[in-house]
Image (cartoon, helix red, strand yellow):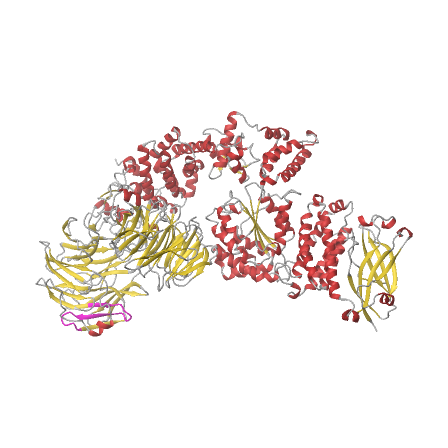
Amino acid sequence: MTSAYTLLIHSIAGVPLQPSGPLGRLKASSTLYVSIHQEGVQVPRTPNKSDFGTPWDSLYILSAKSESSKISFRLMRDPFLPRPDICLGTNDTDIVSLLAMCPPDDESIYARLEIKPKSRDSQTSDKIILSVRLVRQVDASEKAIDVAKVSSKRLESSLGSIIDKLDNLLRLGDAISKINPYFSIAWKVLTVVYQVAKRQKEADEKLLKLVDTMVDVYSVIRDTDFLADKLKSLEETALAIAKQTVECAYFIQEYTGCGFGGRTIRTLRSGMDKKIDGLIETLVNLKKSFEGRMVVHSLFMSIKILQKVEKLDQSDTLKKLNPVDMNANARTTCLAGTRGDILDTIRHWASIPGANSNSLFWLSGVAGSGKSTISTTVAETFRALERLGAFLFFDRNNQVQSHPNGVIRTLAYWLTQMNPHIAAAISDAIERDPAIVNAPIRSQFQSLLLEPLQSAESHIEGPILVVLDALDECGDPVSRAGLLFVLATEVPRLPKNFRFLITSREGKDITDQLQHISTRMQLDVSSTSPDISRFITHEMELIRNREGDDLPPTWPGTQSIQSLVELSGGLFIWASTATTFITEYDPEARLQTLLAHHFIPGSKLDDARAVLGCVVLGKVPMTDETMDAILFPGHRSAARVLKHLRCVVQWSGSGTEARTIHLSFADYLANVGRSGGEPWAIDAQMEHTTLALGCLRVLNSGLKFNICDLEDSHLLNTEVADLADRIGRQISPQLQYSSCFWLQHLEKAPVSGTLLNELTNMLYHNFLYWLEVLSLLGQVSRASEALRTTAHYTKGHSEDLEAFIADAIKFEIAFAPIITQSTPHIYLSALAFTPHQSVIATHLADQFPRKVTYSGPLGANWPTLQKVLRGHSDPVQSISFSSDGVHIVSGCSGGELLVWDTRTGECVLELKMQERSRIRGVRFTPDGSRVVSATKAGITVWNAITGQSLLEVPFEAIYNMDVSADGTRIAVGTTTGIIQVWDARAGQPVATWRTHQGLNYLDGEECIHFSPTSSRLASASTEYTASIWDSETGLLVVGPLQHRTPVSWIQFSQDASKVVTSSTGTVHIWNANTGEQISIWHYWTSRLTFSPDGACLANTTSRGTIEIRDTETGQDITGALKGLTPNVTALCFSPDGARLASTGGGTIHIWNAQSAMLGTAMNHTSIHGGAPICLDLSSDGTRFAYGTEDRMLIIRETETDVPLAGIGPEKDGIIRSVHFSPNGDLVAAVIERPFDSTVCVYSVQTLAKVAILKLPSHVGILQFSEDAPQVTIVSRMGSIYRDLHTDTVPQPIMIDLEGRFRFQRTQLFSETANGPFSHSGALVACAHSNENPCITIWDFQTGGLITEIKSVTVGDLHLSPDGMRLAGVESQMGSSHCVSIWDTRTGRRISETPWHQSISAVQFSPNGLYLAVGTEQSEIFVLNTETMHVLPGVLHGHTESVCSLRWMPNGTHIASLSWDKTIRFWDIRASFESNSALQAHLGDYPIFGMSGPEDGWVLNTASERMFWVPPWLRQGLYFPRNTLVIRDRGTTKLDLSQFVHGPEWAKCIESES
């Protein structure tokens, strides 16, 4: 019967420290192990051991049929050299003897076996004793040996042995510098595992087998005197052993549960035996290779992929990632023996999860401190371990490679290359959503990294390192904001295996995002001297070896090296540059040049400084030829200088760009504190002067009219097919550079007469030509900044020049949109429409005589209205300037978010919401990098440059939002009366409180507002109060501030000393610290905003205008600013207070606030009464009357633009409609107030008021009797009042038209001003828009219902003159897109004409044959009612929705009223004749563009762009078919008799002969 036994090899004692013979030098150069043989058959041997003070505690299982079975223990020496092991001695015994010596009751007693020497030479004076213990298996399980405990101790002992060996190896230091990093990583990982093993109660036998093998491998690497030489001679094999040790350490770390996943993979994974067997086999083969018994090439087994995956054909899919190509060939690693502590710290963080919980390691430091070299060294270490996920490095000289947009795609691509599971997951993500590769950064991260890596997590073990080097050179702070946000908030969500090493300088944006969520190390250049000394010594040795006998053996000497170290200032890049300089030519001479600070003398040194100035201070890299043109006109000096600077300047030869090799060199040269006094130091002010002067001279010599020979003014720049080629041929690089960057050099140069002369020459003679170049290059936005800086530069030196620059600024602001689009129209449109009395027009207009000229009251001076921005399809609800005033963000009721360039008027970005919802608020963050928007459903934070969504915070019932002045917090107010403050980066609430007891909701567009210090928050309440709170605690600080009506608006002044509130009919200013009321003003407003200096307050009025008031007196200091839309929904001052932005409808207006307040610009005062808002024609067509927004009634003749009479103004209310009597002697004005109406009847001849009729409701229809001055009125509540001519409140003759409709419908008639009725007085048609929409037609005499047209929703209605037909604007899907005509007797639909636009007004012609149709897109069509075909030609001229139409009695003319507040009379005859020049150029039906790229353009009938009209001239502009245009601020008539365009445009500079 076979029995089982447990054998424990415990320890050995008596091994001599300095024996002779075969044991000689044993302790120093050999390791021992015990070989066990049973009945002559070897049992697995013990691990090698050189430290005999620690036990083996190796456990083995034996089996034998008889207890007399022989056991032999042989003490073996591993000689290290590749020859057979030596047997030093043996002990032969049997099982029964061992059992007798090992009582099962006492596990502390061991059998002590004497090892008898194999030969006489092996004899020593001391006995060698081997301690072992043998027990039967049954005893072991019950009481003899705790096998688990022993196995645990064995694991602990073996790991300790390996750690000791690694520790010894690490002490060899530089001698094995190539291998050392891997020994270091293994030592760190195993040390952590060792501490875990000491606490474990048992060890897995599979794991013991692997650890024993590692012990065995390291038994061949002993700390002998020649170990370093041995390792170097077998460096590749030793390196392979070191790397494999690291991989085994990672495996053991994960296997024991102290890895990155925090789980024990032996319980979670299948196939661990196979994995361990693979590792063991690799280690055994590496040992054999080291012993010289076999040759192994590239042997390495990685455990990072635990399971194989079937390789799929994913290459085509993964190519869609389009990774950025980054080649690391030229990157260097740290010199061996340098930066050791830093590298160890990073490797420790990357390898051991317990080292720090942060997934991000941020290495920061000044330029040149060695960050990139360190990152490359670490990346190479992990690449060799097959654990480098990606290595991305950025360079500001290569913005294509370094743009933030490519980072996530590139990371995803390289991760697919290292792991098939990741590749499969990312490939699936792209297959599901191919557009994800172009999605916002956060979406890319979610779909291409986070989700795939989480799904592949179970197939990855050990660390994966991602390196992002020089993050500060990845784009700019604004463009990389989204990437930084993702790194800070999303990377920590990745599996813990993924470690991100980031290096950068300490930019504010990077510091703000990374300092709290990363392990951070700042490089201290003051402690780098030893490493720099080692580096310089190494480089000098290479130079000395290369030069041979030309240099003495001790060159350059300790003192020279120390001097170079001191000169370096702790910067490795200086040391590297210096050694490169010495290497290039005559090392000794160049060394002495460096040490003596002696360089090129005289003029050559000046040339060198000038060239270095171009390289360092230039805004973009320049070629040597560009430098020559700017610095040395007519000479070739730059190339001669550059060829001697290749150690610091990257330059490939003539015609190529020069740039600094490293960012730190530019910083060093331009920093007086670091390079001052050195011959190569750059005097930035002087070199900027040189560059500014050179740029201005290039401009004055190179600019000219039509520089690119553009041939057709009808084409936009983008439509010129070969524009890029023309630019390349006609605009030299030096002219391009000078046009774009002369400002940046001028602003940093001192004022000098020479510079002023060149600047004056450029502006007076080449200003428009300079704008030409900027237009062609797409750089018009640079003009505004350049001119403003120039104004500051020239201040106090020349009044005439100052006046020219001030006017040039206004010119650029006004015409930037057209200058951006079309170069020819700098002359044909911008200069043509420049105010006549402006300085620009006075100086330049006569030089270009063949252009459009115009006449009218708006042509003298610059207007306060600077720009009109169009792009929203719904009313704009909120706007915000960026902190630099360059951009505006706007949000509309339809959920559209747009970012605008205020310099050019272009929409530069659309922020696309997943689900559109009414925008409740929108703000730029103070740094301009982000936009915060609020809808009722939540908050979204956007990247302001890329449009990427950075953070989405779901939240219910949001009504308003504000961002703190420091950008760190977002406050939201809800309809439930709750204020909540959120962390703007983390998206977490930090404070919540209820605003007022009993408050149900917050109202108004600005119901919460942060103070400028961000410490307080003001809120407005519908409970008639306002309050000021502590924004961190929610405690009430000031208030409640009592009002008499609900508070709809609240805002702090910029100095936080005041707060302004608005309630119905009043505006209050309060002391924000005490709550004391400073002043109260009585006027109605819905929007308010303080100017940045707090001196002024802009507000809207009930008339749709804007006022700017003095905050001390409350007086209007501007006169009303009238926009181009009927009402104002938002106001916002620019940060510098120079501009005021307002919104109305879907447009944004930008006003010159300073000139408005100073009265220096053309103010928008009315010259013919206020803007018209309602219209009627007399029956004979000779007169027309209209009501104005300032409550005036104006009567005019249709043949002249001179008013006959003006009546009013009325004290209150709005003139809703006007009506002529049939004979034209009387005119009635319907004045509407919130709850009642008054009808005033006037004599047209005498203007006397003949009747006042007061009604308790609003008027729907007013009709004069045919032969008497009496009126019949139908109210919108359904009441009819007849024969009214008294000054009393009338009583209705008929209570309502039909009782059932009176109570079922709250509104009987539509809200159109011309509520339709038949001219004969026989019928009344009513539109009903409640839950059961329909049209009803009534008998006007009896009040009886004739017919009902059900399930129809209409806007405008009009009855044909004979009363037989009814035309209506029918709404479908929420928009008025259909013209329908019904039979009034039967209600039958006669015709239905779908429309491509929303229709706003319809009216039959006098003969009923035609129907005029006005649209919300400002166009007018004429429809044949018999064929339902649209007549040829569209009437363009209005700029807003057409709200009313009237036919002249002759049927050949139409009058139209628009929300642009103009009335236009149109001749619609096919054969009409008008101004011959106007008609000849524009055709019969010119087009007035109102949106997109055509906004402001007048196109001829052939749709060719003729000219662009500035916003302030558009509303009153005469078109060919206009016989009369009425506008309160005046009209404009064009003269095109001298106008040249199209292929002839360039003749505009010629006088017509």
The image quadrant that residue 303 belongs to is bottom right
- Can the viewer see residue 1523? no
Residue 396 x, y percent position in the rendering: 51, 43
Q: Which residue lies furthest to the top in this view?
A: 602
The magenta segment is 1325-1344
Q: Nearer the viewer, residue 953 or 1059?
A: 1059
Q: Which of 698 and 1279 is in front in this view?
A: 1279
Q: Taking 931 as reference, is 1549 left or right? A: left
Q: Taking 1108 as reference, is 1202 left or right? A: left
How many marks overall?
Answer: 0
Q: Taking 1309 as reference, is 978 left or right? A: right
The image quadrant that residue 1095 belongs to is top left
Q: Quadrant of the C terminus?
A: top left
Q: Which of 1188 and 833 is in front in this view?
A: 1188
Residue 707 on the magenta segment? no
Residue 262 x, y percent position in the rendering: 62, 61
- Can the viewer see residue 830? yes
Q: Quadrant of the N terminus?
A: bottom right
Instruction: Check the image and report above or below for 63 versus 1433.
Output: below
Residue 61 x, y percent position in the rendering: 79, 66
Q: Residue furthest right?
A: 120
Residue 1332 on the magenta segment? yes
Residue 999 x, y percent position in the rendering: 35, 63
Q: Which of 1159 and 273 is in front in this view?
A: 1159
